[in-house]
Image (cartoon, grey):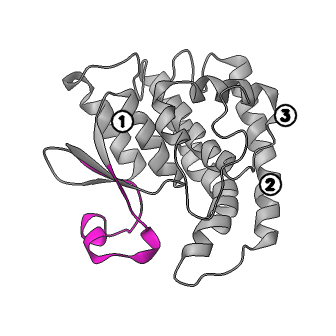
Amino acid sequence: MANLLHHPLCAFSRSIRLALDECGVEVELEEERPWEWRPEFLVLNPAGTLPVFIPEEGGAIAGAYAISEYLADTMDERPVRGFQPFPGGPAARAEVRRLVDWFHCKFQDEVTDYLVVEKVFRRFGPQSSSPNMEAMRAGHDNLRYHLTYVGHLTETRSWLAGDAMSFADLAAAAHLSALDYLGEVPWEEFEPAKNWYALVKSRPSFRPLLQDRVAGFTPSGTYADLDF
């Protein structure tokens, strides 16, 4: 069986867990604490980042984007349950990739880094410290901007990137789910984004994520509630 090295609140890992499930790929999950810089882990990915996917055949594939492209390239080899990471023609696939970059780079830098990293990873890192409250305030402010953008996309399209669900939806939902675990998303103020997230959250691929628990952090009341 294939393996995936991940951390439960790593948004990049979450996006790949969703994609693997949507593509019908069974994996054994191995939790990795990237701040420990294990030598064995660095052999697999010298960058020391998550996730790392190890297929049944072949070497390790590191990084959410590389893994998503691998899944798209090998799609014909597996049964697919109505999902493609990058569906449509060239222009449609380019839009999916634009939004994947938006969430895995811009959203990560402006929101996830300020909230999840400050609140969780800083606590467990080698130089454990209290969260930077100024950074967290910036993250909360930036989150509102991004939720407005998600709402705009969902009001003009069936899914974030177009007519079909894609890896763009999974990338966005992965980041928001990590924030939702920590109770950081003001869903009641952003109804269009909430309605879209409820659709993604109700898919079978999301069930394992909703069962995640991280020591020292209790999930929010909305986290596992499909009718939040």
Secondary structure, mark 1, is: helix
Where residue 128 sits: x, y (%)? 60, 81
Q: Which circle marks residue 20 in the picture?
A: 1
Instruction: Give the quadrant of residue 224.
Output: top right
Answer with mark 3 or mark 2, whichever residue precedes in sequence. Answer: 2
Question: Can residue 167 be seen here?
Answer: no
Please tell me how crowded label 1 is: few (under 14), some (14-19), or many (20+) other residues with Cα within 10 Å: many
Residue 198 vs residue 192, the one in the foreground: 198
Q: Which mark is residue 140?
A: 2
Q: CA distance from mark 1 to mark 2?
A: 30 Å
Q: Secondary structure at mark 2?
A: helix
Percent coordinates x, y for residue 30 in the rendering = 34, 56
Residue 71 in the image: x percent, y percent?
31, 35
2 relative to 14 in the view: left or right: left
Mark 3 touches mark 2? (CB < 8 Å): no
| Marked residue nearer the N-terminal end (1 or 2) | 1
Q: Which residue is mark 3?
A: 188
Q: In the image, what residue type sits under mark 1?
A: Leu
Q: Does the magenta segment cover residue 46?
A: yes
The single residue placed furthest to the bottom in the displayed view is: 127
On the image, the x and y values in percent for residue 156 come to: 71, 18
For the residues carrying marks 3 and 2, which lies nearer the camera in this image?
A: 3
Give the Cα separation between the discs numbered 3 and 2. Answer: 15 Å
> Hey, which quadrant is residue 127 in on the image?
bottom right
Q: How many marks?
A: 3
The amino acid type of the residue labelled 3 equals Glu
Which range is magenta? 29-54
Residue at disc 3, secondary structure: helix
Amino acid at circle 2: His
Between 88 and 203, the residue placed more toward the observer is 203
